[in-house]
Amino acid sequence: MMIDFIFDYATLRVIWWVLLGVLLIGFAVMDGFDMGVGALLPFVAKTDVERRVAINTVGPVWEGNQVWFILGGGAIFAAWPMLYAMSFSGFYLAMFLVLLALILRPVGFKYRSKRPDPAWRAHWDWALFVGGAVPALIFGVAVGNTLHGVPFHFTPDLRPIYEGNLFGLLNPVALYCGLVSLSMLVMHGAAWLAFKADGTVCERARSFGTRAALVTSALFAGGGVLVRLGLLGGYRVTSSIVWDGPSNPIGKTVVADGAAWLANFQAHPVLWIVPALGIAAPLLAALGFRARREVWTFLASKLGVAMIVATVGLAMFPILLPSSSTPDHSLTVFDASSSRATLRNMLVATVIFMPLILAYTGWVYRVLWGKVGSNDIERTGSSAY
């Protein structure tokens, strides 16, 4: 095939590392504001009509946004099977909590409007809050553990062994990253509500969004300080990297190094633009909230979310998941991937179908363009959420 002639095995691995980053950023940007709206629901909406306004800003699109979550999980499963096996085994209980929370979202969306009883709707509104806030927090906790290192190793026959537990995942470093994630997605959800909602919901979203944006910028900058101090962990591959060899994570040497997560930025100073935008974009979003520039605010929020997620990937490259108990068994881009044929075939499918997904998503948002207000809720009646 032509793609075999163009890309060698090492290049395909790097391409899929980039694509994995794109999918994770797409999930954070697209599904992130859904979760942010859910986390904000008890605070920006006090009456049933106001809550329906907030819910109807995401009701028609949240299912489509979930596609990015499915694509990201599928990409990890197919392109990085060792990463999938280790992370979904080690983070099993945490992922189970996330799935329980995510299950509450579709149930809440579908069932809250089935009865006009205020108590009934209040229960489902709290379900939507949990379905938004808990995943936003736990995803950040997972990133924090990834940065700090996860206790695992492989047997000689490459069977993964996880040595930690759920409470070990909830360490101070991971919880700090969880707060970064939660504040980031609350900012993003507020930016969406300011963009899509009208009236009182919009005004409250601006107020909460301004504070969340400032907190996001401060916490992310604080994370940089923690990295500088070596408190967020860090791992460095000291042996030569076999770029195009077979996937075998136990054939290298890795050492813990508190300064390792800064090495790529120091080696390539242009990369500092990414974390700098991760700090600056939320500040621009805060200014946008105050200036009532809704499109500017939402774009700045998107940029901030994307740059914060991208910073983690750039800092860790080429490591995907470091092992805190046996660093030499850490997973990297070049020893944890699927075969060359699998990466090649997946890339062909991605080139064909990704533009279709993007085009359809763009068309949906164009059709649904415009604000949602209390008049729309009263006019649609029970057909609205």
Image (cartoon, rainbow, N blue to C red):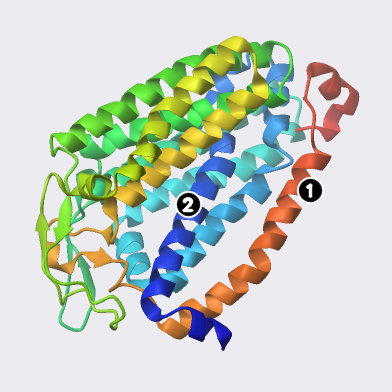
Identify residue for label 2.
Answer: 24
- On the image, which quarter does residue 339 sit in? bottom left
Residue type marked 2: Leu
Between 282 and 35, the one lying in front of the other is 282
Instruction: Please tell me whether residue 77 is drawn above or below residue 143 in the rendered image.
Output: below
Q: Callout 1: few (<14), some (14-19), or many (20+) C-alpha neighbours within 10 Å?
A: few
Q: Mark 2: which secondary structure? A: helix
- Tag 1 or tag 2, which sits nearer the N-term? 2
| Residue 228 in view here | yes
172 to the left or right of 334: left
Whole-number angstrom distance, CA of label 2 to CA of label 1: 22 Å
Who is closer to the viewer here, 114 or 62? 62
- Whether residue 135 is visible to the viewer of this picture, yes or no, is no
Q: Residue 215: percent from the left, percent from the top?
A: 38, 20
In the rendered image, which quarter is residue 10 located in?
bottom left
Q: Is residue 263 left or right of residue 53?
A: left
Identify the amino acid type marked 1: Trp
**Is mark 2 in CB contact (under 8 Å) with mark 1?**
no
Q: Which residue is mark 1?
A: 363
